[in-house]
C-alpha cells in the first residue's frame, strides 16, 4: 500500500459499516481464490490444530479466515480516520474493564485475532491509562507513518521500539503504564522456547512471563471479536498466580489459555501466519 492506498482508506472511512464489510467479503473471497500459497498456510495450520475436523469444515473455516482478515483490514479505514464518536459507537468494551481502570502495573495479553487494531483503538480511546507497545518499523516509510499514526491516534498510547531495550519498558510498567503485548506469533528460534500449542511444539517467546516478573505486573487478557456492529473488546479477569517463576511452564500455560480463546471463534484467529515455521532440531517443516 502507498499513498493511493491510504487515500482509498480515507475515502471509504465515512461509508456505512455494512458497505465496508461487503467490500471486505469480496476482497477476502478474491484473495482466498488467488493467493494459493497463503491458503495452504491456513489449511495446514487448521489441519494441525484441529485434526478432528472434516475436510469440508476446514475448507469452510479457511474461507472465513480470509474474509475476516480482509474485513478487519478495511475496517482500519474508519478505525483510523472516522470521527471519534463513530469509533466509540462501533467498538464496545465489555467484561472486567475494571482490571485496567486503576493504576496497577498491568500487561495486556493481546492474541492475534483479526480485531487486534480495534482492541488497541478501543482501549486507548475509552480508558484513561497510557498504553505502551513494542513497535516494529514497516519497510515502506509512507505506510509506516500511516500505521504509526493510526494505531496511536488517541492520546493514551506510546510506541516503543525494540532498540529502547527491556530496561525502559520495565521502567514504564513500574511507573503505571499498561503494556500491550502480542507474544503469540513465531518470532524465530533466537529468543523462543518450544512449548505445546494445540499439542504441537511451537517456538514461542517467553516475554509475557518475563515482563510480568520484571515489571511486577498482572496479566489481563483482552480478546477482540469482529461483530456485525463493529467489534467487542472483551477484557478478561487477571490471571491469578502468574508468573510462577518457571518461565517454560508460564509460556505453556499462555498457549493453553490462548487455545481456549481460539476455540470460541477459530475463524477469527490470524491463521495466515506460519505459526509452526520454526521446528525443533531434526523435525521436518510443515509448510
Image: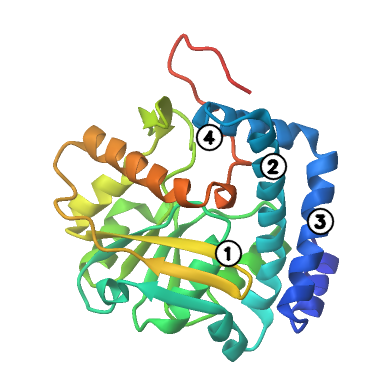
Give the spatial CA distance, label 2 vs label 3: 16 Å
**Label 4 sits on residue:** 275
Residue appearing at x 80%, y 50% in the figure: 29
**Left of 147 or right of it: where is 205?**
left
Q: Is residue 147 placed above or below 214 in the rendered structure?
A: below
Image-quadrant location for residue 216 = bottom left
The first of marks 2 and 1 along the sequence is 2
Residue appearing at x 85%, y 67% in the figure: 4
Observer-nearest of 268 and 284: 268
**Label 2 sits on residue:** 60
The first of marks 4 and 1 along the sequence is 1
**Label 1 sits on residue:** 226
Image-quadrant location for residue 5 = bottom right
Front label number (4 vs 3): 3
Dots 2 and 3: beta carbons under 8 Å?
A: no
- Quarter of the figure with the N terminus: bottom right
Residue appearing at x 41%, y 50% in the figure: 261
Front label number (2 vs 3): 2
Amino acid at each position: 500500500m502507498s499513498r493511493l492506498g491510504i487515500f482509498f482508506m480515507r475515502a471509504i472511512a465515512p461509508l456505512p459499516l455494512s458497505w465496508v464489510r461487503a467490500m471486505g467479503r469480496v476482497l477476502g473471497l478474491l484473495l482466498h481464490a488467488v493467493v494459493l500459497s497463503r491458503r495452504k498456510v491456513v489449511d495446514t495450520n487448521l489441519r494441525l490444530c484441529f485434526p478432528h475436523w472434516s475436510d469440508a469444515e476446514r475448507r469452510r473455516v479457511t474461507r472465513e479466515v480470509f474474509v475476516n482478515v480482509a474485513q478487519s483490514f478495511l475496517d482500519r479505514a474508519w478505525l483510523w480516520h472516522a470521527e471519534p464518536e463513530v469509533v466509540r459507537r462501533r467498538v464496545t468494551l465489555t467484561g472486567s474493564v475494571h482490571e485496567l481502570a486503576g493504576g496497577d502495573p498491568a500487561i495486556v495479553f493481546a492474541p492475534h485475532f483479526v480485531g487486534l487494531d480495534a482492541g488497541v483503538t478501543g482501549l486507548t480511546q475509552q480508558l484513561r491509562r497510557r498504553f505502551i507497545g513494542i513497535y516494529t518499523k514497516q519497510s515502506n516509510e509512507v505506510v509506516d507513518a500511516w500505521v504509526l499514526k493510526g494505531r496511536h491516534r488517541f492520546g493514551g498510547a506510546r510506541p516503543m521500539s525494540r532498540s529502547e531495550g527491556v530496561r525502559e519498558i520495565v521502567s514504564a510498567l513500574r511507573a503505571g503504564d499498561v503494556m500491550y503485548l502480542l507474544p503469540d506469533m513465531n518470532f524465530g528460534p533466537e529468543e523462543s522456547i518450544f512449548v505445546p500449542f494445540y499439542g504441537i511444539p511451537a517456538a514461542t517467546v517467553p516475554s509475557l512471563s518475563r515482563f510480568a516478573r520484571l515489571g511486577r505486573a498482572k496479566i489481563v487478557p483482552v480478546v477482540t471479536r469482529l461483530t456485525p456492529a463493529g467489534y467487542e473488546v472483551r477484557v478478561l479477569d487477571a490471571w491469578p498466580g502468574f508468573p510462577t517463576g518457571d518461565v517454560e511452564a508460564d509460556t505453556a500455560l499462555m498457549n493453553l489459555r490462548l487455545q481456549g480463546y481460539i476455540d470460541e471463534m477459530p475463524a477469527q484467529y490470524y491463521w495466515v501466519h506460519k505459526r509452526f515455521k520454526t521446528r525443533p532440531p531434526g523435525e521436518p517443516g510443515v509448510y
